[in-house]
Image (cartoon, rainbow, N blue to C red):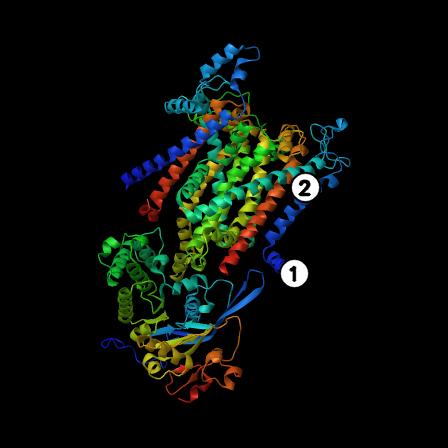
Amino acid sequence: MWVQLFRFLLRRLAVSLPLVVGVVFVTFMLVRIGGGDPVALLAGPTASAQEHAEIRKGLGLDQSLVTQFGIYISKAAQGDLGQSWLSSKQVSEEITKRALVTLELLLWGVAIGALVGIPLGARAAARRGSMFDQVVRALSLAGFSIPTYWLGLIAILTFFYALGLSPAPMGRLDATLITPDRITGSYFIDALLRGQWEVARSALSHLLLPVMTVAVVACAPIMKHTRAIASEIVDSEFIRFARSSGLGERRIRGMVLRNSMVPVLTFVGTEIVGLLGTSSLIELIFSWGGIGQWGLQSILNGDFAAIQGYVLFAALLSVVVFVVIDAANYLLEPRGRERM
Amino acid sequence: MNHPTMTPAATSDAVNPVLSIRGVHLAFASRDAVGAVRRAHVLNGVELEVGPGRIVGLIGETGAGKSMTATATIGLLPPSAEIKGQIIFEGVDLLSLQGAALDKVRGARIGFVAQNPRAALEPVTRVGDQLVRLIQAHSSLSSQAARERAIAILEAVGIPDPQARYRAYPHELSGGMAQRVVIAMALVNLPQLVIADEPTTGLDVTVQAQVLDLLQQLVRAQGAAALIITHDLGIVAQYCDDMAIMFAGRVVERGPVAHIFAKPQHPYSRRLIAASRARIGTALTSMKSDPPDLFRQTTACVYADRCELVAAVCQSAPLEKSCSTAAPDHRVLCHLAQTP
Amino acid sequence: MRTTLMAWLNVFRGFPSIAVGLLIVGLYAAMALLAPWLAPMDPIAVHADAVLSPPSARFLLGTDGNGMDLFSRIIYGARYAFGIAVPAVLLSILIGLPVGLWAGYRGGWIDEGLLRCMDLLRVFPSIILALTIVAATGQSIMNVILVIGLLDAPIFARVVRAEILALRGGLLMESARAIGNGTSRMLFVHLLPNSISGALTQISVRMAWAIRVSATLAFVGIGIQQPTPEWGAMIRQGAEFMVTGEWWVALFPGMALVTLIFGLNLAADGIQDWMGRRRTQR
């Protein structure tokens, strides 16, 4: 079975990579065809025509677009994603520095959103039509309708300004504290691991608001889909048969849970991908310093290589998540194996 | 007809019946697309008995209420169902039972054979494990003992290589195999009564005969009674001791199979039997005009609209209790049945 | 005429979410249409004496960092919300419907291409895509409409395609073909009306999405900018004042956004229930 799984995953990867290349290609073309001439930015107002030409050549902008793309891809495959001309650093460096920061926010947020949303959705499915169910539906609808960044701002207003419970939304740590030595990249976990309680506490308090904002936004769709999936299963023929066999409510609930797990987890996975965009906005508001904030600023500044790096990172992350989901599906869902 | 070496228990109603359905009315209220309330009267005073050790065939056209009778008996009605009457089993009114009390009965004292076997089995659990779960829900057997019992019953229902099939998933089984498993699940806890709802739907003709033979054999061996719901008179003729004919939510005639086939009293029964005989012959007697409108409630005879013997009394006088004819166990729901 | 009205009232009674949702949307639409008469002041008029003043009798919802009246700006903001969402969704339908019809009916490479497009969009969070494209192609309202319209088109195409695939095997097609209908006639007379019902829910959902995305774009700083009274741009400005306690600048535009999007989603939910009910009774 493991061999088949491996072969299956390989096939999925093979299919996904062209998609990733496609996405990067589209971005590449758009960014270049659209406005913004980096040469002028780099050269400065006093540069001569010849200096312009040199810079252009140095950046490789004098060749055809397709050639440029070819060069980009081949370099990317080797890990060279170009240079951000805003910071003059390697794009790959910028990304690796920030990747874990974003992931920390994303994963905590989705985890909490799922931990809250899944039981609520399951409960609503079991008690369809009840007051509880109506409330859950209304809440998830409301959650769908709130723009994330606005929620973040309200959270800041309430917890920072009004109640003074949270620290100022500036980064991940108090400016006065020293960041712990890097083990995982997460200030909170690293500080805990090193026993630096002050630092850990500060990191946690900075984590709270942004993570809770992501959690709320993640919770709504998860709640809605869990309810839908669980409802379908509760109505299914085999649950009906199980009831007719007198298996008892407790066992039935176990069956519903077991049978909904895979579709629900699949959905949570797709949520993670969807939240990449939303979490970027949260990073912006809270000055989180992750890839999302960096990516958004690069877009605003027309920093070509950085934008492509951002897009590439997002696409690759999506692929990884989807492959993981597919693997989980393959392992946990006996029915699907024949189709794969 | 019935297998000569397996004689059924002595004819029935003198002894206490295993199952006694008395005066059951069932209605469903719903809102249609424009929000108005409509009430469908699915069962209108069902009277039915299953004697000890007898196999009763419940027959009627689609919508007559056969499956609903079974659903009501096994306690699977939705909360919105409006039900009146009694269903007495082992001295208790099943309609008054709920929750744990009901769960003790079904699956253990009453076995249910579902219509669509592959849909009835839980997709993500192995077949053997499902059997064991059912066994352990109704007894205190250890896992080992339960497993042995499961393999034994799998063998008894004629599944080749039961040890290997134990580990199969439902989707890996053929339709006939799956139905055998469902029968195994219905019988494994040695019930007093087996209810089979159209047990041969979707099966090949050859497999149908095998499955029915098996069911009859096992039921007789356990000395249990059975209620087989079908729309196929051939099955009733071949496998059942008694039969009950339903039309528009009422049992219009019931009694021993031999009697009814020889001398059907109710005009509907006559046409039904004539139609099935004629199917083998050349002429096709047309059976229906429009199906009866279940939204219209009446206490008089529902069949009056299409009966060739209809008299004035049929449309006015109420018709709740069935009338007896020559034999006490052969009952007819017809004003004109006094004259044999 | 009267019986149609009664039928509609019954629908609303059975599905209150449709009624409430449409009511909210209707109110905002009215706000957008009647803005010049509803707004007490000129939305871009600067009141230099009352910059960042809290809600008062004079400025019902306060003023923003430029001294412009928030209440008037929010009312006019409805124009931008609808002005972007409606054309964008219309564009998606205009592109998506024929593509979906063709893909469902003829299959072939259009169908394949459509599925690939959907895959592409699935691989990628669409907000980032929208941000990148708009940033790259120039920041105008037209571009925002175009991008949202294009990104949503595959969704409508897929809805239509699914409807058609479901209908294809059915009796409808067989009988239509038997009568001798030509291809285009079949498409327009038979398939189109039946597939519209599935798209109805999506229209509401996509409109909510369009409003949300355009506000997000403005918030990030792409697309519409100050002093245009667009809700997202207003929140953007309000963000800096959140930490210093001038809460009204970002709060009220956000509430307007939330309410309208909620109304659209509510209506969409109700329509979906209603469609489901209709389907089981066909």
Do circles 1 and 2 both sit on a common chain?
yes
From the viewer's perspective, is B257 left or right of B38? Answer: left
For the residue pair A280 and B100, the one nearer the viewer reads as A280
Distance in Å between CA atoms under marks 1 and 2: 29 Å
Relative to B15, say whether C34 is above or below.
above
Q: Position of residue C159 (x, y in %)?
A: 48, 47
Q: Looking at the rendering, which quadrant does residue B148 occupy?
A: bottom left
Residue type (three-letter) at the residue carrying disc 1: Met
From the viewer's perspective, is C169 left or right of A298? Answer: left
- Mark 1 nearby-residue class (10 Å; few <14, some 14–19, many ≥20): few
SS at badge 1: loop
- Mark 2 nearby-residue class (10 Å; few <14, some 14–19, many ≥20): many
Residue type (three-letter) at the residue carrying disc 2: Ala
Instruction: Name the mark on residue C1.
Output: 1
Instruction: Name the mark on residue A255.
Output: none
Instruction: Name the mark on residue C32.
Output: 2
Q: Position of residue C262 (x, y in %)?
A: 60, 44
For residue A149, say whether it is visible.
no
